[in-house]
Amino acid sequence: MIAMLEEPETQSLHQRILTEISDKITSGEWQPGFRIPYEHELTIQYSCSRMTVSKALSQLAAQGLIERRKRSGSFVARQKSQAAVLEIHDIGTEVEALGLTYNYRLLTHKKRKVKVADKSLLDVPSGTTLIELSALHSAGGLPFCLEERLISIAAVPEAESVDFAAIAPSAWLIGHVPWSKATHTIGATGASEAVAAALHIAIGAPCLTIERRTWTSDQPVTHVRLTYPGNAHSLVAHFSP
């Protein structure tokens, strides 16, 4: 008799925990990266067993709403973004499509002559002046993508006077420079020390990289390397016969 009476109550508490935590996440009250109260804190809050709490958290993790980290606790998961492989699009638009607040910060910006090492990235004549940029794109207050870019001033002279601290180079180029050809190279890398520091991930953590080259009238315009935390990004391609 006791077991029969307790089972509905346990189920009710399980559903209540699920609903209340998921509502806080989907409403934005708990942002990506927010630490969920520890299991023992939830057992006190809901006056239930630790097994009931653990079952609810496991279900939330299976739904992709939270991440459970050993010895660290549970955290609101970042939504996994999707990039269309065969499209060139603005990163800000990509972030906003996830329903997250977008922020952009210019990290470095300098003008220099092309180097030998640049030839494999942007095939421009010796002596060509380049703009070298790095920038961090954030989603919901968390690092989303590191952008490292070279722009040929010979192809886009107006880029020399653009304030890239005010507008992301990806957004400006899409809006101002028509392109006639592009290539994408997709790879997986371990985060270098610099990349790890920028994206707030561990050194060596898996990352997804997209390298893109664009041309206008057969003249090289830009090379960009976009680096994303590997566990928060996926690629999508659409095909037709």
Image: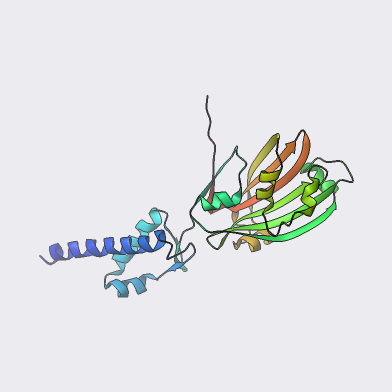
Q: Is residue 158 left or right of residue 21?
A: right
- Residue 21 against residue 113 in the figure, above or below: below
Relative horizontal placement of residue 150, taking residue 68 as reference (left or right): right
Split into 4 quadrants, where in the image is the N terminus? bottom left
Q: In this view, does 198 lie above or below 155?
A: below
- Does residue 8 sit above or below 95 in this rendering? below
Report x, y in % for residue 236: 53, 40
Residue 92: x and y in percent read 58, 52
Q: Which residue is drawn at 62% across and 41% down?
A: 88
Q: Which residue is painted at 37% across and 58% down in the image? A: 60
Viewed as shown, does residue 148 lie left or right of 26?
A: right
**Residue 73 percent across, percent down from the top left:** 44, 67
Residue closer to the observer: 117 or 28: 28
The answer to which of 206 and 209 lies nearer the viewer is: 209
Looking at the image, the residue that sits furthest to the top is: 241
Task: Give the colour scheme of this rendering.
Answer: rainbow
Name the foreground residue: 49 vs 45: 45
- Would you place residue 24 above or below residue 238 in this image? below
Instruction: Tell me residue 35's x, y (percent).
Output: 45, 68
